[in-house]
């Protein structure tokens, strides 16, 4: 008999927010949803300098108040470490500040956890379809590109 051991991928997720309850809730829920797909190491902090200490970071969930003046740091993380970033905005934030961060994913408090999980799924879960045609509306059909 042959046993095959499949090792789950290890992911490093960082949450930067000073709300301990929020951090724990995100860790618990995200871990539950993705436990079959990969193992997650969560790092929770309110210090932005933790980002420089890690060699690789798969996902950063950060409160906007910690990055207001640090746009370039996050752009570099996307480029150099290939990190995925989700910015959490408090409801009282001046919405005009959002423009600068429009290339990142973000959620505005209060938000449904389902929305955050959907963003994370889009980052890390590949969607494959074996259908030849996907009907979008009555008059619109999508045909996946075929390999030549």
Image (tube, rainbow, N blue to C red):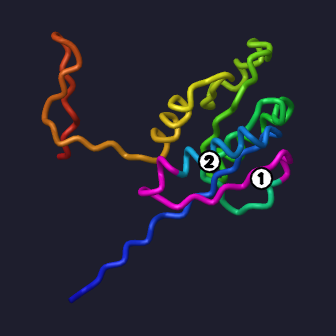
Residue 131 inside the magenta-drawn segment: no
Could you tell whether 36 is left or right of 57 in the image?
Answer: left
The answer to which of 108 and 79 lies nearer the viewer is: 108
In the displayed structure, would residue 2 be above or below residue 97?
A: below
Tell me the magenta residue range: 32-49
Residue 24, image x, y percentages: 69, 46
Residue at 52% from the left image edge and 61% from the top image edge: 39
Residue at 47% from the left image edge and 47% from the top image edge: 33
Residue at 48% from the left image edge and 59% from the top image edge: 38
Residue 87, image x, y percentages: 69, 32
Q: Which residue is mark 2?
A: 59
Location of residue 74 by image quarter: top right
Could you tell whether 96 is left or right of 47 in the image?
Answer: left
Q: Which residue is mark 1?
A: 51
Q: Name the secondary structure under disc 1.
A: helix
Q: Earlier in the sequence, mark 1 or mark 2?
A: 1
Q: Residue furthest left?
A: 132
Residue 42 inside the magenta-drawn segment: yes
Could you tell whether 84 is left or right of 134 in the image?
Answer: right
């Amino acid at each position: 008999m042959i046993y095959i051991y499949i090792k789950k991928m290890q992911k490093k997720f960082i949450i930067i927010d000073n709300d301990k309850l929020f951090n724990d809730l995100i860790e618990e829920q995200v871990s539950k949803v993705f436990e079959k797909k990969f193992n997650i190491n969560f790092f929770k902090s309110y210090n932005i300098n933790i980002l420089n200490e890690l060699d690789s970071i798969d996902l950063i969930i950060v409160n906007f108040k910690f990055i207001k003046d640090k746009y370039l740091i996050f752009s570099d993380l996307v480029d150099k470490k290939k990190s995925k970033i989700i910015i959490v905005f408090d409801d009282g934030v001046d919405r005009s500040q959002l423009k600068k961060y429009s290339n990142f994913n973000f959620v505005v408090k209060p938000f449904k956890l389902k929305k955050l999980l959907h963003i994370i799924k889009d980052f890390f879960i590949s969607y494959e379809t074996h259908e030849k045609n996907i009907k979008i509306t009555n008059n619109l059909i999508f045909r996946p590109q075929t390999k030549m």
